[in-house]
Amino acid sequence: MNKTGPSTGALSLLIFLLFDTSLVAQSLTSSSVTALSSPIVTTLSLTTSAAAPVAGLQWTLSYPAGSVSNLSLTPGTALDSAGKALTCTAGSASYTCIGAGGNTTPISAGVVANVAVTLAPGATSALITVSNALGASANGDAIAVAGLNGSVTVTGSPATPALTGLTCAPATLSPNGSATCTVSLSAVTSAVASVTLASNAGSLTVPASVSIP
């Protein structure tokens, strides 16, 4: 994604390559990040060997749909410097991303992608799962990458819900008539919220306030 600025953590892509044609298992690690408020911004960072540079990457980030209202990725400086584009496809509570370009320029160590996570109303943490990770050399050799999970956690107090709507049925009243009205808030609240009401018509009487829930 009235709030403390985004906090930055790190997701580390650790690539260890042999100095011959064989490739060994790699790991893509999602770190655990704690912030005072959401959205939380973390980074996907690449560490590689100059002897066997990486020219392309792909991975999938998954999250619990009930805890995360939005997750987005933007290219980091390592991809930009190598002339690579970041392409992400949304799935069911997941994003599969490819960092590649029409060149064999190696991707330098550094930030590959910035990941912004917005928690759903009422949620205080979410597990971010890294899977289907894979790297490729300039020659097209596959580099196996194992994904290690991380989490994001909000420790601050949730924002105070705001009034977003007031609907009444029926919408019009006859003399001595009455209506039932519903008040909507911008976020779920576990505490009792009081909404003040007033009428600009002398003949219409409303309660001074209502409590939610």
Image: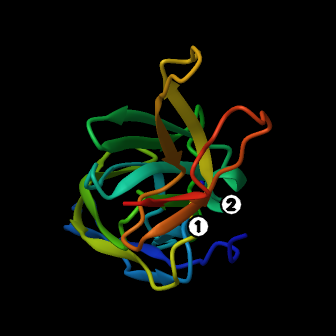
Residue 96 % position (x, y): 35, 41
| The C terminus, quarter of image | bottom left
User: Is residue 130 among the parts visible in the rendering?
Assistant: yes
Residue 175 in percent (x, y) is at: 59, 18
Where residue 2 sits, quadrant-wise, is bottom right
Q: Which mark is residue 21?
A: none
Residue 194 location in percent, x, y?
A: 54, 65
Query: In the picture shown, does residue 191 fall above or below 166?
Result: below
Q: Which residue is mark 2?
A: 77
Please name whichever residue, 78 or 38, is drawn nearer the observer in this view of the structure.
38
Q: Amino acid at mark 2?
A: Thr
| Residue situated in front as seen by the camera: 71 or 184 | 184
Q: Residue at x 71, y 48 (%)?
A: 198
Return the disc, 2 or 1, that comes first in the chain's sequence: 2
Q: From the viewer's side, name the closer residue of 24 and 160.
A: 160
> Which three-letter amino acid code belongs to the residue tagged 1?
Val
Residue 32 position within the rendered picture, expressed as x and y whole percent measured from the top left:
37, 81
